Image (cartoon, rainbow, N blue to C red):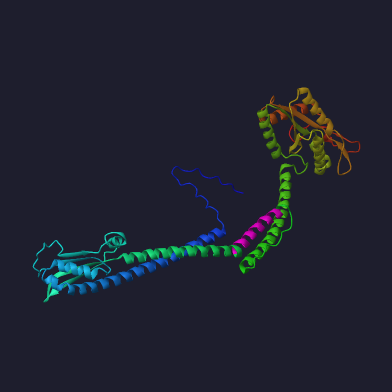
């Protein structure tokens, strides 16, 4: 498994994107139905309201133009004689019951111009049209119609009518009310549809989710899985069937993975043991012993402790190989390793450096006399007859060198060198010949001292 550490956040960089809030399927469907219903109602209501407003506006303008033409004929004589009172009286009588809020008459170029051009010749304002719905409608929809008042082909005045658009505003208000009513009805319909969906879809999905959680608990307890519930819907039933099949496949895959895991674990332990042990003797090999020695030095330095390191070399091992063969030498090496391992405690370590060289690490700090007593115990432990493959026996002997931490060194190299030198000092002092059994043949060089302190001892 590769572990990725998050990179440090740079100043000014955006933070992590927050996870979306969880919601239920029923709430999601209800929200979606609400959005669709509201959008549909608003769209239809707006289209209908705008269309009705345009039609009503067009109809109002046309009616207003017809009224203006009819009124222009009515006030023609009064305009010709410029009788303002008559014009205003006619406007009041004719427009009192019409959907017109105001009327104005401007004299044209062919008239006598008894009033200033900036003033109206005659004007009419329907009572109450300057407040309420009429005022709002006039400000929002200024619907006007303007027609000329003619006599003998000349334009005497211009008649302008302002329509009363309060009906249009009321239509829009009624349209808004209808939209709100439709929205309320849509809400009721959404609630009913959501409940039906909850019974037919959301509840079976919730049951399937609860079944999944229950299956997880059963798998943790090692129990057999149960079939998923059916909802009576083809798609959901197919989903339940696929879930059951997937669960069975997952169990089979998990069992296969467990078997492979146990096999790999066993193989890894076996390889790890083979990598850390000497292939012939079964004790720690050189690399493993050096790694443990370095770890032991670190621990002793940290805890202000100590330990003993013994360098062991088999005496006259070359003579045994030359006299009895390499198979006999291997037999002697295996016996030496087993006896050295039995002569120390379980927490101590025995390793083979190579050839006939062994090392023994004894944990703990001891006085010199005790350390030398342990060395004698090691020599005595191996001094027993070893039966060779050819039936003969030989009594092995060893030379033991001692180095104590931290007195003889604080590094692995210094301790190994000190123990090695101490071992050769003992070997030169003893020079003990090999002791074969009475029935073992003796060679001439078996009793000769070694020519070199390395390997040919």
Where's residue 446, x and y in %? 83, 35
Q: Is residue 319 above or below residue 255?
A: above
Let me know if residue 343 is in the magenta part.
Answer: no
Left or right, 320 with respect to 66, comes to: right
Residue at 74% across, 47% down = 270
Quarter-wise, where is residue 396 in the image? top right
Residue at 62% across, 69% down = 234
Where's residue 168, x and y in %? 33, 66
Left or right, 11 with respect to 270, comes to: left
Let me know if residue 214 is in the magenta part.
Answer: yes
**Residues drawn in magenta:** 201-219
Q: Is residue 302 above or below residue 89?
A: above
Report the residue that reaches farthest toward the left.
112
Camera-side residue of 227 and 343: 227
Which is the main secondary structure of the residues drawn in magenta?
helix
Where's residue 432, x and y in %? 82, 29
For residue 430, say whether it is visible.
no
Residue at 73% across, 45% down = 274
């Amino acid at each position: 498994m590769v572990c990725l550490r998050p990179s440090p956040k740079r100043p000014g960089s955006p933070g992590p994107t927050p996870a979306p809030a969880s919601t239920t399927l029923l709430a999601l469907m209800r929200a979606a139905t609400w959005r669709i219903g509201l959008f549909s109602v608003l769209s239809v209501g707006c289209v209908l309201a705008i269309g009705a407003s345009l039609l009503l506006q067009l109809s109002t303008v046309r009616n207003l133009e017809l009224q203006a033409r009819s009124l222009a004929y009515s006030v023609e004589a009064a305009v010709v004689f410029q009788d303002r009172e008559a014009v205003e009286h006619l406007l009041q009588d004719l427009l009192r019951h019409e959907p017109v809020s105001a009327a104005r008459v401007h004299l044209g170029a062919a008239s006598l111009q008894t009033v200033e051009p900036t003033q109206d010749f005659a004007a009419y304002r329907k009572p109450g049209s300057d407040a309420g719905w009429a005022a709002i409608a006039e400000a929002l929809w200024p619907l006007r119609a303007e027609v000329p008042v003619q006599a003998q082909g000349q334009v005497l005045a211009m008649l302008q009518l302002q329509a009363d658009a309060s009906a249009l505003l009321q239509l829009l208000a009624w349209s808004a009310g209808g939209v709100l009513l439709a929205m309320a009805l849509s809400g009721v319909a959404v609630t009913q549809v959501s409940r039906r969906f909850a019974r037919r879809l959301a509840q079976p999905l919730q049951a399937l989710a609860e079944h999944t959680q229950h299956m997880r608990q059963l798998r943790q307890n090692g129990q057999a899985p149960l079939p998923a519930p059916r909802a009576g819907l083809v798609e959901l039933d197919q989903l339940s069937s696929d879930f059951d099949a997937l669960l069975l496949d997952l169990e089979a895959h998990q069992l296969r993975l467990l078997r492979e895991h146990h096999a790999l674990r066993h193989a890894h332990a076996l390889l790890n043991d083979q990598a850390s042990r000497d292939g012939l003797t079964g004790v720690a090999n050189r690399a493993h012993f050096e790694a443990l020695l370095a770890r032991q030095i670190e621990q002793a330095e940290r805890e202000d402790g100590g330990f003993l390191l013994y360098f062991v070399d088999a005496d006259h091992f070359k003579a045994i190989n030359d006299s009895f063969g390499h198979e006999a030498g291997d037999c002697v090496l295996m016996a030496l390793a087993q006896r050295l391992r039995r002569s120390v405690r379980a927490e101590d370590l025995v390793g083979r450096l190579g050839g006939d060289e062994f090392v023994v690490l004894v944990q703990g700090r001891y006085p010199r006399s005790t350390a030398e007593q342990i060395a004698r115990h090691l020599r005595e432990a191996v001094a027993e007859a070893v039966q060779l493959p050819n039936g003969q026996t030989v009594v092995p002997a060893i030379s033991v060198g001692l180095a104590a931490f931290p007195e003889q060194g604080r590094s692995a190299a210094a301790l190994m060198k000190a123990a090695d030198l101490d071992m050769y000092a003992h070997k030169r002092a003893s020079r003990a010949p090999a002791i074969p059994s009475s029935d073992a043949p003796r060679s001439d060089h078996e009793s000769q001292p070694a020519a070199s302190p390395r390997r040919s001892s």
